[in-house]
């Protein structure tokens, strides 16, 4: 058998449910598991000000509340996929869901800022156990049109969760449920996690790789080093005043990344199973799809952070108004993503190209709106640009996920999903670090309006890059 041939997926006894595939309720359950980690990446954006006041936290520490979760999440995602392949994806899904609920409770009860940072790191690690099992389970228990629909729903869920996280955060902070204030953005996860556990125990079939590979310790350590040395200084540097350690860390990043690729390539050539098998990138859909996921997610992550700051600090929107302003974007994304499978069946990957052009038009319209109307902008003035951008994003993200995973064999479902979500999560964090830093660096000298316009212009350029790259995607989408 060659490396990229597809073996059968063995059910772990007594998981006869695996043979029946994933039921609609089981699919809804794993999609719930996909939504939680992504919601929590963005839900804190509109709660940071309240956290800072309540915990007397400096901007640098508040940056760590965001970065601690994002870095831990990104670093451990591929390992989470490998563990699911080995020990059973349902088992790891349940473990990750339980850990996510416990760490969310710890975040919500944190007595001080540094305890919150530690709890957020642990929450990110729990998310890294949970999320890879979703795509791996879909890959292993569905095929043909059912798999295509399930992957499209996953993409729709992922994109919607990122927008809904910010909306939900604003509503919860403003509602001040039982006097919990910002803590509600974490405590709300506890009953949801309990529901997820109850549903998963009954509806999610157990699957694992037919030939589980041992943990690649050198690869895991080097991947963690590469991501930490890049993401942590970029996220924390501005707030900390760019101390020496941030420059040293950035200087170490290319060394760690080069060492990681060398170790993985050597392991693949000698017959061992690396954490990220280079042979996976022989799949054109995965290779070309990931090349689009990077700029798309970088722009998305940066935009969501910047728009939260601009709405609250620049336009003086309250938490609820800042969340409600994003509702047109969320609705447009959701509606068009539901039509995505039919559009893809008819037009193939051209849907991604058109989506990129529509997103660029929406961001350009939003830029013009800010230039002309600042600071007297409200919901109705912002709605056309945000809705158009959301419509374009809804045409891109679900299709990209489907393209990336279409050719990944079931044996490598955990590794393939881990690689994809690591790329997505790292890019989201990179977007917050780069576009967020650009915006916050320009704002004191150029003003909020000009800083926002510049950041939006950079994102439009990134979207146009994705449009060009989309022309290299496989025309037919499986």
Image (tube, rainbow, N blue to C red):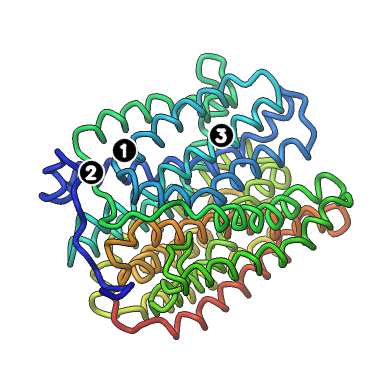
Position of 478 relative to 391 (above/below)? below
SS for callout 1: helix
Q: Is residue 35 left or right of residue 460?
A: left
Label 1: few (<14), some or many (≥20) within 10 Å? many
Closer to the camera in the image, 396 or 385 = 396
Residue that label 3 marks: 122
Which quadrant would the N terminus be assigned to in this image? bottom left
SS for callout 3: helix
Tell me where residue 258 appears, x and y as whole percent.
66, 69
Q: Is residue 315 left or right of residue 14?
A: right
SS for callout 2: loop
Dot placed on the residue nearer the N-terminal end, 1 or 2: 1
Query: Residue at horizontal 19%, vertical 41%?
Result: 25
Query: Residue at horizontal 63%, vertical 63%?
Result: 369
Tell me where residue 134 appears, x and y as whole percent.
34, 49
Quarter of image, res 340: bottom left
Q: Which mark is residue 206?
A: 2
Dot placed on the residue nearer the N-terminal end, 3 or 1: 1
The answer to whether any part of residue 414 appears in the image is yes
Query: Residue at horizontal 41%, vertical 81%?
Result: 473
Quarter of image, res 56: top right
Closer to the camera in the image, 136 or 362 = 136
Front tag of 3 and 1: 1
Residue that label 1 marks: 91
């Amino acid at each position: 058998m060659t490396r990229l041939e597809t073996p059968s997926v063995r059910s772990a006894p007594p998981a006869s449910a695996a043979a029946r595939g994933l039921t609609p309720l089981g699919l809804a359950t794993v999609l719930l598991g996909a939504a939680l980690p992504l919601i929590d990446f963005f839900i804190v954006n509109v709660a940071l000000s309240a956290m800072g006041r309540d915990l007397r936290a400096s901007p640098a520490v508040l940056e760590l509340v965001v970065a601690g979760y994002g870095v831990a999440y990104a670093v451990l995602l591929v390992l989470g996929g490998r563990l699911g392949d080995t020990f059973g994806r349902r088992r790891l899904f349940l473990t990750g869901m339980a850990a996510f609920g416990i760490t969310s409770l710890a975040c919500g009860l944190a007595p001080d800022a540094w305890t919150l940072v530690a709890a957020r790191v642990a929450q990110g690690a729990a998310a890294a156990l949970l999320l890879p099992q979703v795509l791996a389970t879909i890959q292993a228990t569905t095929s043909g049109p059912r798999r295509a629909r399930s992957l499209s729903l996953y993409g729709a869920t992922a994109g919607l969760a990122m927008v809904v996280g910010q909306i939900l955060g604003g509503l919860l902070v403003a509602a001040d449920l039982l006097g919990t204030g910002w803590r509600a953005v974490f405590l709300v996860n506890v009953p949801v996690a309990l529901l997820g556990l109850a549903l998963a125990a009954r509806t999610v079939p157990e699957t694992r790789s037919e030939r589980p590979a041992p943990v690649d310790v050198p690869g895991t350590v080097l991947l963690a080093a590469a991501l930490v040395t890049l993401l942590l200084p970029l996220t924390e540097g501005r707030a900390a005043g760019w101390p020496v350690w941030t420059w040293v860390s950035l200087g170490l990043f290319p060394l760690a990344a080069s060492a990681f690729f060398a170790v993985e390539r050597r392991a693949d050539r000698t017959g061992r199973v690396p954490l990220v098998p280079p042979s996976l990138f022989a799949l054109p859909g995965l290779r070309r799809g990931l090349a689009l996921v990077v700029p798309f997610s970088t722009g998305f992550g940066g935009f969501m952070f910047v728009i939260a700051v601009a709405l609250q600090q620049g336009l003086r929107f309250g938490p609820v108004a800042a969340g409600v302003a994003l509702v047109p974007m969320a609705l447009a994304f959701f509606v068009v993503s539901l039509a995505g499978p039919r559009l893809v069946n008819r037009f193939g990957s051209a849907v991604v190209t058109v989506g990129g052009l529509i997103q660029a038009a929406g961001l350009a319209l939003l830029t013009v709106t800010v230039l002309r109307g600042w600071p007297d902008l409200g919901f109705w003035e912002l709605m056309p640009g945000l809705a158009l951008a959301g419509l374009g994003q809804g045409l891109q993200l679900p299709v990209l996920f489907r393209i990336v995973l279409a050719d990944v064999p079931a044996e490598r479902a955990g590794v393939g999903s881990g690689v994809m979500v690591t790329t997505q999560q790292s890019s989201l964090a990179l977007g917050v670090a780069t576009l967020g830093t650009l915006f916050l660096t320009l704002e004191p000298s150029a003003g909020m309006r000009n800083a926002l316009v510049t950041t939006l212009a950079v994102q439009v350029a990134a979207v146009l890059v994705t449009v060009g790259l989309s022309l290299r995607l496989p025309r037919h989408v499986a």
